[in-house]
Structure formats: structure tokens, C-alpha cells
Amino acid sequence: MERIQDVCRFVITFHTPISISTPHTYISTGPFLPSQSPLSSIFSRWFTKAIKVQRGKLFSWPAPPLQWIGHSGAVASLSCSPNGYHIVSGSYDKTIRIWDVETGAPIGNPLTGHTGFVHSVVYSPNGHTIVSGSSDMTIRIWDADTGVPIGRPLEGHTDRVWTVAYSPNGQYIVSGSTDRTIRFWDAETGVAIGTPLEGHTSFVRSVAYSPNGRYIASGSGDNTIRIWDADTSATVGGPLKGHTDIVLSVAYSPDGQYIASGSADMTIRIWDAETGAPIGRPLEGHTGAVWTVAFSSSGQHIISGSSDKTIRIWDAETGTAIGTPLEGHLSSVHIVAYSTNGQHIISGSSDYTIRMWDVKTGAAFGNPVARVLSAERMLYLVLSLLY
């Protein structure tokens, strides 16, 4: 595994000369391998008469790309694999991509099958499958290792599917649609469970399971949030009212006690998950619609992404903004997520890119990259160097 990762870093770093001429793989790039790279010792044994770098040789590989480039449409959704190695993204280019977190490189070919925008993607709790929701009105389940679709598309919604989520135990999938309903699905068979949940008077833009799996929160174009009993499908209490525009995103805190919501009214609100009461004042600072919100694994922080092109970090207890906005995206930030280890923030934007940020400093993580190699070219180079 270490050799494979090292080869991937090699291909990402030296993609330009390799793309121009394959012989450069051996002639021009080998001498510049970092001293710590396993490939460096192999190269020095094979090519004893190659040039030597006297000064400025890298000790270790440079950081991953600042921008992960590959989609040809807005990046609408992201999800981190439970093991922390991969990120899956869904795009308006109708494809899904899987990325290597360490290198920022796309893995394999794009997952194709949807005939409309891919609005939502999420890994299953065990990391074996990925579920996606699309404007083509269907939900698809994919093998996370092979990228192969599992079974037929899940059909039942009568309009675009905005949002999908796995239950914490991985047995169920919940989805929300422009048809104003929420549906449950058996994650193994793809069969719809029960009747659609009705109550919202406009499209369902976001759904989230509570950590214990007992409840579901939903945000809607009717400006409200609703809480549902996952077992009985009944609404729990009345609608949570306070936002003055579309509720674009909802998220449960890790302990399940709070719900955070982001809205087109440019604010974030925190709610008591048991009583539905708003906690404190709205979190204000964004100058555009708040497309996405997420809690840190500790529950101490909330991150948000907005059409103002920025990401903000908030103290979940006080509602105070922490530091300055994270800037770098050239268009709306549609999705933010914490990395599995909690050390980075991952963001996707309508500028077609994915970015990674350091949680502590807020600095963009990595170095700029102009483009990425095709999956076929990457595979060829990796295999040629390994064998």
C-alpha cells in the first residue's frame, strides 16, 4: 500500500513531463524524487548514471492540490468515507467522482448513470456503498470500491431528488424531493418502505438522521424545518419556524441535542432538537444564501458555506464567528464537510472545484494544480512503475 500511495504522489507531482513524454518518467523525474520516497531508493539502484541533485532536493512529497479539478459542472455534494481515505462528490455534470484524500487525485473513472444533476451523495456508515440523488427523479446505490451501480435505480419520487441520507445503522436510506415528500428505502433491496412522508408545503431540500437513528430532520422551501419519527413516520411537534426564506441545509449535532439550519435568508439557526425551540439569535455574517451547514465531531463548532463564495466557522455554543471567512472559491460554496479525522474542512463549489482547508488555521491546504491526468493514464503509469 505504501508503494502504491508513493507512486500516486509521483504521478500527481510530475504529471506535466510524464504527459509530454513517457520516457521522462525515468530520465527527468527520477533524480527529483524526495529522499524519503520509497521510489527514490529503487530509482538510485536502477539508474546509477542519472544526474544528481546537489541542492534543493525535496525531503518529502509536496502537499495535495489546492483545488481538486475534474468535474465539468458545479460540485453540489460531498461525503467523506468512514476510513478517511476517500471523498465522493456529486456534480451538475451528472457524474459522481471518488477522490484520494492524501493526493487529491480522482480514483478511477467518473460514476455515470444519472441523466440529471447529481444533487446529493453520501457514503454508507460501513463505507461499502454510496447513495446518490438526482434531478432525474431517481436514487442510485453504488459499490464504493468498484464504482459499479448496485441494482436498478430507486424510483418513486415524481420530481428531482434534492437530498439523500443513510440511517446510522446503514439499513435505510431517506430522501427528500421537489415533490414535497420524504421517502424511506431499504438500503439492501432498494424497495420503498411505507408511504411517503407528507407535511411540507414546498420542496424538501435537506434531510438528516439523528445520531441515534430515531428521528429525521428536514428543511424545505416552505421556510420551515420538520422533525419526524423514523419508526412511525409521524411528525414530532409542529414545524420549526424562524427562517424567512428557503431552508437549504439541516444537520444534527453529534450528541443529537441540537439541529443547525442554513437558509437563503443568509442566516444560520440552532434549534433544540427535543423541543424545537430556537436557541439564541440567528448566526449572521454571510452576505448570501447559506447553502450548507455541518457540525464538527466534537459538536463545538459549526461550519457553513454560502453563495457569497466563503466558508465560515462558528462557535456552536455562543454563535460567534471564529476567525475570518475562508476565501478561495470563485463561486457559491454548495457543500462543506469535516474530514473524517476532523483536521480539515472539505468544500465543493459551483466553480467546479473541491478545496481542502486546515481547521485550526483556516488556511487552504495544498498547492495549486492546473489539471489532473485521466484515470486511464494514471492507471497505466502506476502499473508500469509497480511492475
Image (cartoon, helix red, strand yellow):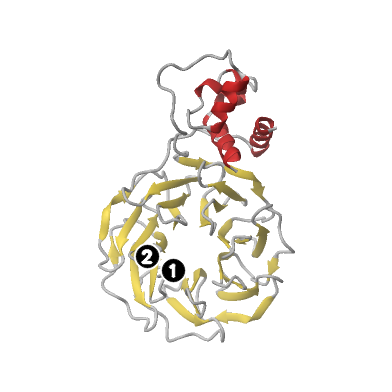
Q: What kind of residue is marked 1?
A: Val
Q: Residue at the location (50% across, 78% down)?
A: 200
Q: Mark 1 points at which residue?
A: 250
Residue 235 left/right relative to 129: left
Residue name at image x 57 percent, y 80 percent: 197
Q: What label does residue 14 carry, if any? A: none
Q: In which quarter of the image is the C terminus?
A: top right
Q: Nearer the viewer, residue 305 or 338?
A: 338
Q: Mark 2 points at which residue?
A: 298
Q: Residue at x 66, y 79 (%)?
A: 193
Q: Is disc 1 surrounded by few (<14), some (14 to 19) or many (20+) residues within 10 Å?
A: many
Of the numbered discs 1 and 2, the one sitting upstream in the chain is: 1
- Asked whether, in this view, residue 106 is left or right of residue 243, the answer is right
Q: Is mark 1 on a helix, strand or loop?
A: strand
Q: Which amino acid does the dot numbered 2 rest on?
A: Ser
| Along the viewing direction, whichever of 380 and 182 lies nearer the viewer | 380
